[in-house]
């Protein structure tokens, strides 16, 4: 069930309630369990209100904002506030699909349609039937794929690669980009007819430096989460730590703030926040080599009980990830540091619920 803070509208026909996860934040709005939009009543109020306005319609929505500003989180909010909330929400990173596979990924393929097509495959449009298809990094779609996407949006039908049957699905398309699509249209790298189509309703997510009032509640939120995940006890920044955080310009936006606070919690052994040290580490360096990283302090042993093996392993992996900014593979990557195969490390991280992307910068 989707729950919202009392001052916000719930999905049409849906229940009105306050979620315990959102409550301590005052201005937060809960997307899913443990998935809260902090600042919904402050710096993101206008954004959330636009999302609430457009959510019940089936109009395509384009989310624009700098890296780490919250596009994906807000796309999920849009889905949970829509009448499609009971259906799937499929996210496709358009920048990560090799150009030659895009058609097959989006529209599926019939068995034998190309070498390697050993079976029929449903594309993302078919998988998102009844729900929302979130095309992330849409600016990275090659021009040929842009033409086909436009056709689906205009005609509502498509065919699988190697197929002849026209297929029709009920999908709401939400797109996101950190690029300037208008400029890309001007220079010819993005089709303007597709831009008009996906941008019927655009939501601009302001960078964090333009909504400094959100920094304290966000830092409080991430400190609480980090403390709980490291030792089971929530942490909270002091007012002078919040001042220090407000002085920084946050080029990596909310993702960077989350990483700094988590790093601060790790450097403080999970029992206090080392904001100054973590902020020092946030400033760009010429190399991410470990030698350039500030010395990390070993986590303090828990006072009242020994950490379980999983907790200790989790804290150790998280610490290594924070040191190398989320890089898993290669020399000096997390797997290398910990002396394990990257594949094994990914398996352990999945099992322990560690999201490496939170450490990326
Ligand atoms: N308002 C917010 N409240 C709580 N968490 C947030 C908020 N905005 C962003 N986050 C968190 O910050 C991280 C980055 O957000 P998200 O992935 O949505 O950004 P993005 O704009 O899609 O970034 P990118 O362009 O790099 O893909 C996520 O972990 C997300 O949950
Ligand atoms: Mg994103």
Image (spheres, grey):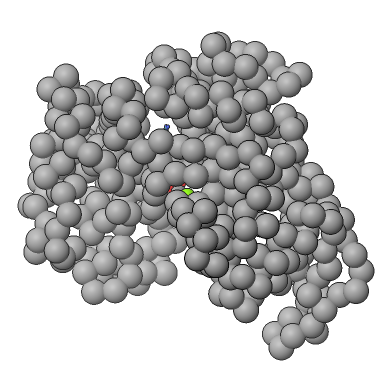
90 to 328, vertically: above or below: above
**Left or right of 352 on screen, residue 243:** left
- Residue 91 in view (yes/no): no
| Image height of 77 relative to 97, above or below | above
Q: Residue 137 in the image: state x and y as whole percent.
A: 52, 57
Position of the C terminus by quadrant = bottom left
Q: Residue 95: x percent and y percent? A: 51, 64
Q: Residue 199 placed where, x, y %? A: 62, 46
The residue at 24%/23% (across/down) is 236
Which quadrant holds residue 246? top left
Left or right for 358, reference 113 = left
How many numbered tags mark residues here?
A: 0
Q: Position of residue 241 (x, y in %)?
A: 15, 27
- 274 sits to left or right of 337: left
What residue lies at 9% left-to-right and 64% top-to-bottom?
A: 291
Q: Who is closer to the viewer here, 29 or 43?
A: 43
Q: Spot the residue most to the right.
A: 165
Residue positioned 57% across, 19% down in the render: 4
- In the foreground, 358 or 208: 208
- At 62% from the left and 62% from the top, the residue drawn is 191
In the picture, the quarter occupied by the N terminus is: top right
Q: Is residue 316 left or right of residue 295?
A: right
As rendered, which of 261 and 299 lies closer to the eye? 261
> Which one is nearer the viewer's eye here, 263 or 57?
57
């Amino acid at each position: 069930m989707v729950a919202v803070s009392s001052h916000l509208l719930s999905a049409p026909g849906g229940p009105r309630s306050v979620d315990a996860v959102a409550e301590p934040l005052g201005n937060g709005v809960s997307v899913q369990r443990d998935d809260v939009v902090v600042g919904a009543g402050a710096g993101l109020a206008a954004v959330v209100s636009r999302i609430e306005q457009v959510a019940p319609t089936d109009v395509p929505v384009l989310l624009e904002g700098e890296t780490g500003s919250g596009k994906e989180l807000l796309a999920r909010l849009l889905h949970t506030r829509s009448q499609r909330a009971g259906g799937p929400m499929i996210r496709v990173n358009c920048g990560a699909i090799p150009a030659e596979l895009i058609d097959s990924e989006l529209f599926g393929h019939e068995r034998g349609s190309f070498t390697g097509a050993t079976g029929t495959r449903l594309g993302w449009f078919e998988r998102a039937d009844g729900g929302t298809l979130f095309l992330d990094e849409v600016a990275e779609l090659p021009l040929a794929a842009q033409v086909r996407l436009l056709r689906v949006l205009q005609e509502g039908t498509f065919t699988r690669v190697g197929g002849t049957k026209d297929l029709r699905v009920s999908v709401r398309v939400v797109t996101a980009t950190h690029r300037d699509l208008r400029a890309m249209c001007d220079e010819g790298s993005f089709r303007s007819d597709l831009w008009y189509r996906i941008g019927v309703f655009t939501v601009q997510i302001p960078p964090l430096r333009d909504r400094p009032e959100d920094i304290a509640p966000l830092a409080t939120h991430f400190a609480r989460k980090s403390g709980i995940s490291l030792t089971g006890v929530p942490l909270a920044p002091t007012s002078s730590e919040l001042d220090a955080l407000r002085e920084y310009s946050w080029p990596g936006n909310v993702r960077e703030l989350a990483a700094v606070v988590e790093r601060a919690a790790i450097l403080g052994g999970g029992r206090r926040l080392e904001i100054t040290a973590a902020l020092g580490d946030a400033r760009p360096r010429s190399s991410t080599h470990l030698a350039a990283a500030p010395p990390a302090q070993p986590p303090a042993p828990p006072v009242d009980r020994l950490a379980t093996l999983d907790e200790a392993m989790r804290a150790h992996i998280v610490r290594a990830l924070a040191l190398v900014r989320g890089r898993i593979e290669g020399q000096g990557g997390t797997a290398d540091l910990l002396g394990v195969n990257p594949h094994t490390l990914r398996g352990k991280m999945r099992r322990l619920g560690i999201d490496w992307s939170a450490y990326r910068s």
